[in-house]
Image (cartoon, coloured by chain):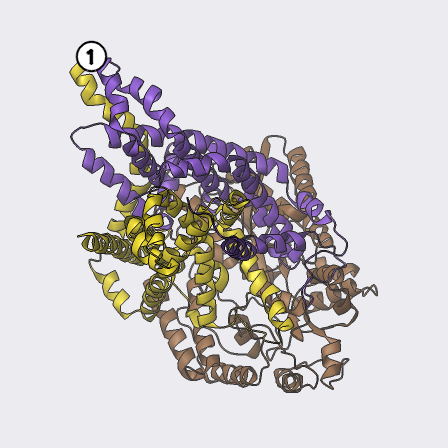
Chain colours: A yellow, B purple, C brown
Amino acid sequence: MSRRTHRALSPWLLLLPGLAVVAAFSLYPFLSTVHKAFTDARTLTPGRWVGLENFRALLEDEQFWVALRNSGLYVLLVVPFTVLLPLLLALLVQKRLPGVAFFRSAFYTPVVASVVVAALIWVWMLDDRGLVNGILGVLGAGPVHFLGDAWLLLLSAMALTVWKGLGYYMVIYLAALGNVPRELHEAAAVDGAGALRRFVSVTVPAVRSTMVLVGALSSVAAFKVFSEVYLMAGPTGGPAGQDTTLVMLVQRTGTGLNGRVGYASAISLVVFVITLLLMLLVLRAGREEDA
Amino acid sequence: MRRTPGWEKALRHLLMLLVLAVTVGPFLWQLSTSLKGTTEDVYTSPPRFLPAHPTTGNYAEVADIIPVWDYALNSLRVAVASVLTNLAGASMAGYALARLRFRGRAVAGLAFVLALLVPLESVIIAQFTMVRDLHLNNTLTAVVLPGSVGALNVLLMRNAFAAVPYEVEEAAVIDGANVWQRFTRIALPSVRGTLAVVAIFSFMGAWDDFLWPLIVLSDSENFTLTVGLNFLHGTFAQNPRLVAAGTVIAVAPLVVMFACLQRYFFRGVGEGAVKG
Amino acid sequence: MPIRRSRPVAVPLLAAALLLTACGPGDDGGGGSSADGKPEGRITFQTWNLRANFKDYFDGVVRDFEQKYPDVKVKWVDQPAEHYAEKLSADAGGGTLPDVVNVSPDLSHPLARAGLLMNLDKEKAAARFKDEYTPEAWQGNVLPGLSGAYAFPWYLNTGPLFYNKALFRKAGLDPEKPPRTYDELFAAAGRLAGAPGGRAATLASAPAIEDFGRYGVRLMNDDATKFTYNEPKGVELLGRYKELYDRGGLDAQALTNTPEKAGQKFLEQKVAMNPGSAHDLETFRKNAPGLYRDLGITDAPNNTGKPNMYVMGLAVSEKSRHKAAAVAFAHFVTGRERQEEFAHKVAVFPSTRGSLQDPYWTKDDGTDAGRVRVASARMLKGAVNYTPVVMSDEMKTVLRNEVAKALQGKKSPRRALDDAAAQSNALLERG
């Protein structure tokens, strides 16, 4: 093999395993999902082409709008917390103090536990007679029926998402904070700027690109939320299905032996397009601020 | 450098303890529940944080219901294999994307970004058909395969390589080292921390996965721990102590592993692998 | 489902979409073998969450069978309770359905319709065993519109209604006189809700399709093409439940409780009554000794004279390469001797003819378990599986959510049931 062809080939040889896996197990299957979205396929029958019928049915499906609302709310209410709280946490554990390494690792524990385990623990804590109501009882309040009310359930699931994401995003911020020159802070401190001023005028600008990244990652994840709500509110999506999210709707309509695969594919496609737009939007917003 | 005043130190520690209670507290509560004997009421108000008569009986019972050790071994095999394939596959692809100039680089990069957006839950059956066509269903290999090179890991490695100053490699180029030599001898050693991050992410992913192993595996002998622990639901769900013991069994190995690797992990974070 | 028929509570990761089901049978095509020949070959036998409790029993069954038919090797696999339908879908689509598979009628219906299960009435080698089972049980596996039974009847389950005598006493109700009809049930509920010193909820769940059935509501038309539970009687039941809910007669989490969760509420003594099976006795004894001392047992109220029962069966894959062996094995497991042995191990009931005349199921031996067993076995005569087999999980969710809206007062009971029936009928039509 000539040196030239070798050089032309080597990138592709390096990429081969990764591309093969991603193509075979994500991209190609997704293309067939796209195709299915325009058919009336069911779990055990291939279905025929129905054009935009599934999408038309979506618009008339009350559950779809409820799910769209919930997934949208999830982004709106979860993302501010996953962008800000982990940053504050990173600032807290960034300073070299005795024991800080321990705290840093400990804060990561919820990330390590699977969402199934995390949800089991939370359901156990939020039960009418669980830990949280036990503590509220001691304080003379409650019991609060966290798991019986549609809104409380949704908020609890959101809290779980934030809780599980804290450590993950904290780590991303720690990486970025490592690059903020200490002198900037010191100079500001000498100027007599308070902690809040320093946070706004020094820290935030320095980690803005990271905040945008965290914003993009967590909005995509929040919009695609499934496990937390499914596990806490139950497979039917809380009281009267009021907590159903889009991906839960995909699961409900598309799975099982009677699954309406075509219809569920159409919802998946909607989810894909919205997440793509969401990511572009967040990245764009970040860029404009830079300019 | 300015000294941190005493009150600030105290405040910081106080805050950290608070966050600690929120992040780790629930796990300790679970651990405590799992150690409570059948005679102890687990619903008392006010809650009792320490078991009155700690017992490992619940763990023994879980092990009695399901072959926990066999399943843990299967999970371990899958997780270790996934770590190895991800380290190799993601670093190779990441290096090519970060360091090599070639036609189609942008497209290749885009492929990984798009793969990140695909809702996994919508492609699981197609994945099953794929491994069946490869005659791999009901094997642990099939459990590993779809996650063997994670798109996110590729992007993490790409960023890590991109952050290494180019000059280091330039010298090697002049010395006539080929791509592979530069990759293994120079580039890889300088992103060790990120490799630890990728290792931990892929271990966690493989260890925690439930639906995919369930779909792929039929034979109970091959079950992974998460699938096996699911046998605790149903008839046993009414004993929260058993469920608690099951969750502790599922989480503990990860916590231990993370505790061992955390030094490398945070170093990897320092390398900027996970930065934008 | 395993012994207790319950829907998953906490369910692991992403059960989501089988978007790309490999639609239809796999490419091994045509498939199947003759069922008449000599039983031989390797077959796979799949059960549903039975390994944890009955490993030794099934190992024994397989061993005995292999001794009787030395040319057959049986591989036993067991699946967890959750996502069983997903697992079956993947196997059905991928052409890897086990030769003998544990199904309930709602699972066998879609599989049979896709031509993946053997019609036992049409297959002589299987049909000849028909008379060994009770007619109700065999009928329970006959699928509407598909002319035939698609699974050998296996175990049956029905259950009493448990109640908490302590809560009854507190409310001033006679703990020895549990409600027997729906009128009495709703009357008792009123007392329980107003009890001094902590009111208690009567029931932990909103009504499901079985409850409508027991109340005497006509659930579907005769050829199972339309849901009819929105008839006046259904509206009446939902209206009464709504009153009950408004007075605090249902648990605060009634709209989200799964059967498992409902059981837990009863265990915690937060609700006064809960349907269950003899199987639960052991759980009560172990986990809630206080409750166990005050446990009352009665028949679930019904207006039809026909209690509800759940039916489990063993189906044979139409694509099996060793049909003769598969039929032989399915029959072996569901044969009288094996079924009775199994039913002695756990509180389920055999579906084989004559089994229930055995003193074990007719004579109260004085224990609580014995009492429940005899009472339940008695109920099985004339019991029916109220849940229509064409009712998919999605249709159950539709009903559940509309019922919840009515209880919350967002819709009138009539409107809610009309909507639920309309949505379900649309799903049926498209099916």
* Quadrant for the C terminus of chain B in the image: top left
Residue C191's x, y, as percent?
A: 66, 87
Q: Is residue B119 visible?
A: no
In this rendering, the count of numbered labels is 1
Q: Position of residue C258 (x, y in %)?
A: 55, 65
* Image x and y of residue A228, in percent: 45, 58
Q: Secondary structure at mark 1?
A: loop
Residue highlighted by disc 1: A1
Residue A269, relative to residue B225: is it above or below?
below
Comparing B93 with B228, the one in front is B93
Answer yes or no: is residue C363 visible.
Answer: yes
Q: Quadrant of the N terminus of chain B?
A: top left
Identify the residue shown where x is 18% and y is 55%. A288
The residue lying toward the viewer, choosing from A241 and A175, is A175
Label 1 crowd bin: few (<14), some (14–19), many (20+), radius 10 Å: few
At 59% from the left and 74% from the top, the residue drawn is A143
Note whether C20 is above or below C285 in the view shown. Answer: above
Q: Quick one: which residue is furthest to the right in this view?
A: C366
Q: Chain of mark 1?
A: A
Judge whether C101 appears above or below A230 on screen.
Answer: above
Amino acid residing under circle 1: Met
Tell which of A168 and C254 is nearer to you.
A168
> In the picture, residue C427 is in which quadrant?
bottom left
